[in-house]
Image (cartoon, coloured by chain):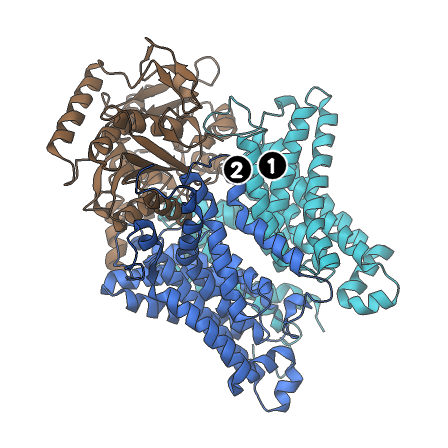
Chain colours: A blue, B brown, C cyan
Amino acid sequence: MDDTSLGIWGVPLAMLAGAIRVSTPFIFVSIGECLTERSGRINLGLEGTLVMGAMSAYGVALMSGSPWLGVLVAAMVGLLLGALHAGICQLPRVNDIATGIGLMLFGTGLAFFLGKPFIQPKAPNLGAIDLGWWSSIPQVRQALQVNYLFVIGIILAFALAWALKNTRWGLIVRLAGESVDAALAIGASVNRVRLIATSIGGAFAGIGGAFLSLYYPGSWNEGLSSGQGLMAVALVIFARWDPVRCLWASLLFGAAGAISPALQSVGITQGYYLFSAAPYVLTLALMIATCSPERSLRGAPGELGAVK
Amino acid sequence: MFNEFTIGRRALLGGAAGTAAFGLAATANAQKPMVVGFIYVGPRDDYGYNQAHAEAAAILKKMPGVKIVEEEKVPETVAVEKSMESMINLDGATLIFPTSFGYFDPHMLKMAAKFPKVQFRHCGGLWTEGKHPVNTGSYFGYIDEAQYLSGIVAGSTTKSGKLGFVAAKPIPQVLRNINAFTLGAQSVNPKITTQAIFTGDWALPVKEAEATNSMVAQGVDVVTCHVDSPKVVIETAERAGIFTCGYHCNQAKLAPKGYLTGAEWNWERIYVDMVEAMKKGQAPGNFVRGGLKEGYVRSSAYGPAVSAAAREKTDAAKAAILSGSLSIYKGALKDNKGNTVIPAGASYVITEPKLEGMNYLVEGVIGATS
Amino acid sequence: MTTTLERVAVPVLALLASALLFGLLLALYAKVDPLEAFALMYQGAFGSWFSWQNTLTRAAPLILTALCTALPARLGLVIIGNEGALVAGGVAAAAAGVAVSGAPSLVVQIMMALAAMIIGGLWIALAGGLRQWRGVNETISSLLLTYIAIALMNHFVEGPLRDPSSLNKPSTHPIGDTNMIGTISGTDVHWGLVFGIVACVAIYVFQRFTTWGFAMEVIGGNPKTARMMGLNVDRYVLLACGAGGAAAGLAGMIEVAAVHGRANASLAVGYGYSGILVSFLARHHPIAIVPVAILLGGIGASGGLLQRRLDLPDAAVVVLQGIIFVAILASETLYGRLWKPKAVA
């Protein structure tokens, strides 16, 4: 063993590092979806929004030379796709789950279609904050390379949780999600609330996509997302519609995803397919352990179609 | 701005748009160009496996009297049978290159039996005389020769003595590459180890980045890979400040500082030869294989970080491979479980059939085949 | 009221609107003549007997996987684990087929089908059971089970079930040529299409004309009322999920027995996900699934021609699918409003 090796201790460190690196898109998509679902609408199309965000962020960063402009455009694209979803779903008799699946296909296809010219060139990336300056261990320093968007995501999760609970605006969103009648009684337009909540949710997902293409893994190609947006939407149900719990769920999911490469890198190499299923098995096991028929829907917005 | 990029890509892929738009008319009246079909399993601009084929196909487009039709992202199912059939029925293709390994059995064989007059040539190297139809064939390159050279460069450059290899699945083609890369490095310093990490599939960018980072955390300072698109591995390594060796095509642009060299395909030779044969009215070769000597594989030009000594060593090994005096796989060779896989005194030429079924990782590779 | 005319006119309007949008994208961005593109699509999907067979072959697996979403949807469940059930069923079928490969081929085929349907059925019934007994949301659990099924398939195909001679494409042992399911005579479409159509008709009859079918509709309408009526909701949920999973499992068996001859990673190519789309587009109606699957199969079949003749990327047909899907869903709002004075559309 030489001094660069941490041996088995590398595994928990790698999981921490993995949580920091991999979780950001999950955080953004899941808190965005959390807001949308709290207003009483489900948007399964965020996978498509994520991929569109990734493509447009990369394209804009490439053409303008500014990755932050890319993030901004990704948020705008997400906003538009969210508004499109909300606009279609407020038509009478239109099913929001099905429309979401349709927009997932549309967003992914459009991103691949328009994104062809951006696969080859190299766009400037978002920088990182070096939080590991105090450590002499290179692995720790590497693990603590933290992207701004990760920090923003954490702040947003807490801010959203606070706003939902303590502001008039949060109350109206929750009312729209719990009971249309109650919302109408205080004079709020349910459709407008949901339009805004779904659009903002889409914008968050777009930023999550920008993180994928502009920071980690940090390039645009058609295999970039591999279902992360869909999984993040599922995590909202797992987190029972609480933004802060969405944050923990995303971190946990990111850490579990780092298990397979981390174990292989310290020489535990048997059965890696089973290890790569770890995030899914873990999520399922936690859901089985923590749910019960009585408690399962606690926290679920009353107007949400998916859990009726 | 968008259009500029579109045109850029079109130019790169050989200006297909213009010719394809008139495809219908052209087949109808001109003196029937020969139609050649290419089928790719992934996007044809993936900076990797599929792009290597598409770049060679783009060169064919310039040949007079040849028309190229291409389909990308065709899965290894009944869909590829239908793609081939559609190319034959609707486009009049007479030569088809299904470029992914899984297209061979049963899909291409089924189509070959159905269309005995059409020639099928498959990239992968499974064709056996007497067993498979005569209108089929296979071609492949011994890219492990180029991997061995990459290994020498990597072994000469590493300071920690730890190399990394991000791989998709433990199949013989991948294991050959991991082993050749390791043996090349060990020819410089026998103590060098290679950390192999299997991601489980051919295109999983986030996992590939994670695998690269976890190797960096373990002190690995040169990585290479065998996945469909090496872009993510190369870029992640460059950002972490370590060295890389490329795969499939030249990725030097992605890592101006850390790119050492790379193992590249050169399908152009094979495709041009086969099309020329067809134009002369002959059947293209049924079993076409070759390595550095035949020019089917090559190494990327050395990057700035490669020392003069390393260049010299690698060039010498290359010359020895070309002259046939150097064998990559020779005894006594042990696998990483301690079993002898090649007995002392034995030495395999690169064409040795036993190597096609390689199911072990050599001593010095950290990793398991299942 | 929804009239028969509307049932035809509304989807046709939606398709025309999609064609217009897609045509604009082609003309303005890709600089391709949309009319030529549509002519090619027609030629590739329905323009000849060959094209029809191409379309039907692609539609066949989608019919069965769509049932995996459609049956539980009748009870108000949103199941999206179709791909997992297909993969699990396919691996089970290959294992069973190899285990009894010496038996007469009909026996082998029946054993394979049974194994696939049982495993596929259990896979989705697990999601249904977890919902009823533990309150676990079935949408997320069925999605998680898909990822788990694919990981298990890779593990088995590259480990315990691997045929050592399958070198660069790890696969199970082949089930043997004599045990393969052939094609419908006179065509090259495999029997999976017939299985799918028969299953759809049978399920329609079951839903429409049996007490159990009626009970399921009651549960889907209002589970509380159903419980008060004394219906065993848990049992019906398990039944619907099990039957849906069995259909997707059977699709996996057909992939093994009619296409590949063995199980390998090519089982997971997205038929399950497409099945979700088909089911929602057909509004979970078993008979409507058939034409919708053929439409999707046709779009898939024409995609190759668009790539070859117009140099469009593969993604072009994905965009078109997305547009059609959203347009048809959005058009549902038009039912009952088309021929009334206040109608705006």
Q: Residues within 10 Å of mark 1 (few under 14, many from 20)?
A: many
Residue flagged by tag 1: what amino acid is it? Glu
Q: Secondary structure at mark 1?
A: helix
The C terminus of chain A appears in which quarter of the rendering?
Answer: bottom right
Locate residue A287 relative to residue B117 in the image: left or right: right
Is residue C27 or residue B152 the one in the foreground?
Answer: B152
The residue singled out by tag 2 in the image is C266
Residue flagged by tag 2: what amino acid is it? Ser
Q: What is the quadrant of residue C319 in the picture? A: bottom left
Is residue C82 or residue C148 the one in the foreground?
Answer: C148
The answer, for residue A30, to whether it is visible in the render is yes
Q: Chain of mark 2?
A: C
Q: Residues within 10 Å of mark 2 (few under 14, many from 20)?
A: some
Q: Secondary structure at mark 2?
A: helix
The N terminus of chain A appears in which quarter of the rendering?
Answer: top left
The answer, for residue C15, to whether it is visible in the render is no
The residue singled out by tag 1 in the image is C255
- Asked whether disc 2 touches disc 1, contact meaning CB atoms under 8 Å apart, the reply is yes
- The x, y position of residue B178, in whole percent, is 35, 30
Distance from Cα at disc 2 to Cα at disc 1:
9 Å
Locate residue A306 relative to residue C46 in the image: left or right: right
Q: Residue at x 46, y 38 (%)?
A: B83
Q: What is the quadrant of residue C248 in the picture? A: top right
